[in-house]
């Protein structure tokens, strides 16, 4: 059974804290993605990575950074958490290659910044 | 900038009825159009997907209709069941899994 695992289901952090969201996949996928999900806005891409130590900005990268030191692990970092970053965060992965293939999602991390 | 527009935001259907969700896109370079289903507390999961070289794809009760000239595609759920109650997202992609999602539709199927 393929899996994308996010380290926390729920997190509560204070404004200004540095926050780490961890994601691990066991499918040997090349591509990994971080999205945030907000009601009425769907899923919006924050950052993505096509290879180890490689990263690209998505549509809403401001206030976030990422790290991919190993193929199976992709971390999202909120350098200084703010209340407008309260959201559901979803990690996903896809296999490599030219054609688009199925994205597998983790169960999500609901982050509340107070 | 939202490149995929989805409607309606919410939908209530009677058991046995047909659920229809519509999406429109702007970028003609998109070459992959999946639909994802999300249950509360879970991440989205692929339901069905289509590529622009076909106009329709059917898997069981789920059908994607694709109109390339109109830049629109839709999901039809036949014989809708209470277990289909979930949030549905359309999406589009140009390359390597980078998905642009619609806003989502919350479907409720009443018994």
Image: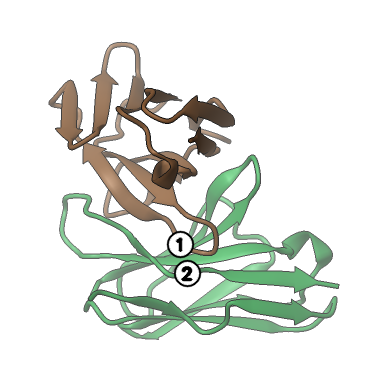
In the picture provided, is A85 more to the left or to the right than A44?
A: right
Seen in the picture, residue B22 relative to A1 is either above or below; the reply is: above
Q: Percent from the top left, x then y, of residue B16?
A: 36, 27
- Can you see residue A64? yes
Specify the colour of chain A. Answer: green
Q: Nearer the viewer, residue B22 or B17?
A: B17
Colour scheme of this structure image?
A: by chain
Seen in the picture, residue A79 relative to B64 is either above or below; the reply is: below
Seen in the picture, residue A15 relative to B29 is either above or below; the reply is: below
The chain assigned the colour brown in the figure is B
Label drawn at residue A23? none
Q: Secondary structure at mark 1?
A: loop
Q: Residues within 10 Å of mark 1 (few under 14, many from 20)?
A: many
In the picture provided, is B36 more to the left or to the right than B64?
A: right
Q: Quadrant of the N terminus of chain B?
A: top right
Label drawn at residue A107? 2
Pointer 1 chain = B
Q: Quadrant of residue B48?
A: top left
Pointer 2 chain = A
* Residue drawn at 55 percent across, 28 percent down: B12
Seen in the picture, residue B65 relative to B29 is either above or below; the reply is: above
Label drawn at residue B43? 1
Rounded to the nearest angstrom, the CA distance separating label 2 from label 1 is 4 Å
Q: Percent from the top left, x then y, of residue A28?
A: 22, 78
| Residue furthest to the top | B69
Q: Secondary structure at mark 2?
A: loop
In the picture provided, is B78 more to the left or to the right than B26?
A: left
State if disc 1 and disc 2 touch (CB < 8 Å): yes
The count of marks equals 2
Q: Nearer the viewer, residue B46 or A78?
A: B46
């Amino acid at each position: 059974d393929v899996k994308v695992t996010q380290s926390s289901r729920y997190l509560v952090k204070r404004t200004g804290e540095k926050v780490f969201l961890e994601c691990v996949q066991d499918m040997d996928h090349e591509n990994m993605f971080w999205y945030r999900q907000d009601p009425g806005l769907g899923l919006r891409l924050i950052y993505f990575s096509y290879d180890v130590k490689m990263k690209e900005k998505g549509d809403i990268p401001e206030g976030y950074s990422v790290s991919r030191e190993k193929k199976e692990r992709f971390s999202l970092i909120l350098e200084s958490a703010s209340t407008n970053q309260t959201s559901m965060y979803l990690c996903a992965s896809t296999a490599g290659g030219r054609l688009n293939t199925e994205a597998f999602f983790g169960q999500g991390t609901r982050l509340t910044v107070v | 900038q939202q490149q995929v527009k989805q409607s309606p935001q919410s939908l209530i259907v009677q058991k046995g009825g047909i659920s229809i969700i519509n999406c429109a896109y702007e970028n003609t370079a998109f070459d992959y159009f999946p639909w994802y289903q999300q249950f509360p507390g879970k991440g989205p999961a692929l339901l069905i997907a289509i590529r622009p070289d076909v106009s329709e794809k059917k898997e069981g009760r789920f059908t994607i209709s694709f109109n390339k000239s109109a830049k629109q595609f839709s999901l039809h759920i036949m014989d809708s069941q209470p277990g289909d109650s979930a949030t549905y997202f359309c999406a589009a992609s140009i390359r390597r899994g980078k998905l642009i999602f619609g806003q989502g539709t919350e479907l409720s199927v009443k018994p």
